[in-house]
Amino acid sequence: MTAVPIAISTSPPRAVRAAHTAAADEREMPVVGPLVDRYGRVHDDLRLSVTDRCNLRCVYCMPNEGMTFLPRAEILTFEEIVRVAAVARALGIRSVRLTGGEPLVRRGICDLVGRIAALGFDDLSMTTNGILLAPIAEGLAAAGLDRVNVSCDSLRADRFAAIRRRGELDVVLDAMAAAESAGLAPLKVNVVLLRGRNDDEILDFAAFARDTGRIVRFIEYMPLDADGAWDRDQLVPGQEVVDRIAASWPLEAVQQPDDPAPADRYRFSDGKGEIGVISTVTEPFCGTCNRLRLTADGAIRNCLFSDAEHPVRDLLRAGGTDEELAMVLRRAVWGKLPGHGINEPGFLRPRRSMSMIGG
Ligand code: SAM
C-alpha cells in the first residue's frame, strides 16, 4: 500500500487547526478498507511506545534531572498493547516499530515482541539507544523482531557522554555488532545533529557507514525536547549533510518520490554503503506520511507535532469492542492535518515531548 502524495503549502495556527480537526467531516470517513485520511494518505505504519522511561538523558530529548514519568497504572499492559496492534493489523497496518522512551527498559520486552510478531506484520522493528541491547539481541530476534535502529550521536567517547549524559559509546558499538550477529539487519544508526556539537562528525559517520555497511541516518533536531530549548539555528539541514558528504564521496539518490519512509536515502556511487537524511523541519515529508502512533499511556496520535490525541486506554479497560477501537483509529487518521506546521508563524510546539510521545 502506498500513500498518495499531496502538495503541502501552508498550515494554519493551532487554534484554527484544532477547530479544523474538530470539524473534520466524519460522515465522509470510510468505515471499511484501509486507514485513510481526508487527503488520501493511506496509513500502514504504527509506532508503539512501550514506555516513557529512558536510561539516558540526551540533551535534545530530556532534562538531565527532574523528568516526570507516567505512573505505572497509566501505562498500557502488554495485553492492551497487543489488542491495539491486532486491531491495527486488521485495518491494514503492515509495519510496526517499538519505541519509547527506551523500549528495552520495559521488563519482559521479548515477550511483548513475540506476541506482536505472532500477529503477522510484514516488518517489526525497534528504535533503541542500544545500552541494554547486546545481551538481549538474540532473544529479540528469536521472538520475531526483524531489525533495530540504534541511536548514536557521536563516535567520540567524551562527546557521546556529553550529548547522551549517561551510558557509554563502547557499549552501544558492541550492541550494534551483537544485533547484527543475531540477524537484526539491516542495522540503521540514528544520529541527531546539533550545530556546533557534533556536526563536525558528519564525514566520520559517512566513513562509518562505508566501513560497516550500517545505514547511518542523520536526523534534524526537532522542537520536541522536554527543556523547550530548541531553536532553528541548532539544527543541521539534511541538504547540507548530503552536500558535505557528496563533496568527499559522490552520492546517488535511491528514493522513489512517493516513498512514505521519512528518510531521503542516498547510496555511495562506488557502491560502498548508504546514508539517509531525515529533514523533518527543512523539507517536511508530510505529503507521504503513513504513520500513526500509540503513546505508552494509550493515546493514538496522528502526528508527532499535533496535540490531538485519541485515547484508547479507558475504552480498553471498560470492555470496549474491537469495532469501537477500530473507530478510534479511523477517526485519529481521518482527523490528520495536511502538514505539521513547524514552519508556519503560528506554530506552537506540542505539549508532550519526544520521549512522552514515542519517537
Ligand atoms: N530511546 C530510543 C532511542 O534513543 O533510540 C527510542 C526513543 S527516541 C525518542 C527515538 C529517536 O528520537 C532517537 O533516534 C532519538 O535520537 C530521536 N530524538 C529524540 N529527541 C529528538 C529531537 N528533539 N529531535 C530529533 N530527534 C530526536
Image (cartoon, rainbow, N blue to C red):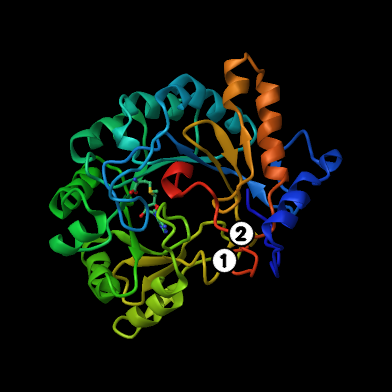
Q: Which residue in the structure is indicated by mark 1?
A: 284
Instruction: Give, as a three-letter code, the residue at label 2.
Output: His
- Callout 2 touching callout 1 (CB < 8 Å): yes
Q: Is residue 105 visible?
A: yes
> Residue 197's image quarter?
bottom left
Image height of 40 relative to 181, above or below: below
Q: Is residue 34 visible?
A: no
Identity of the residue drawn at 53% across and 48% down = 351
Residue 89 lies left or right of residue 201; in this view the side is right
Vertical placement of residue 123 versus 319, above or below = below
Identify the residue at image location x=65%, y=65%: 346
Along the polypeptide, which appears first: circle 2 or circle 1? 1
The x, y position of residue 65, in whole percent, is 28, 46
Against 220, residue 40 (above or below) is: above
Q: Residue at x 33, y 29 (%)?
A: 109
Q: What residue occupies the far bottom of the structure in this picture?
A: 247
Q: Residue type at mark 1? A: Pro
Expressed as whole percent of the image width and height from the top left, the position of residue 226 reads 41, 51
Question: What numbered label is drawn on residue 340?
Answer: 2
Q: How many marks?
A: 2
Q: Position of residue 77 (x, y in %)?
A: 45, 22
Image point (65%, 26%), residue name: 325
Considering the numbered disc 2 on the image, is that residue within a helix, a strand or a loop? loop
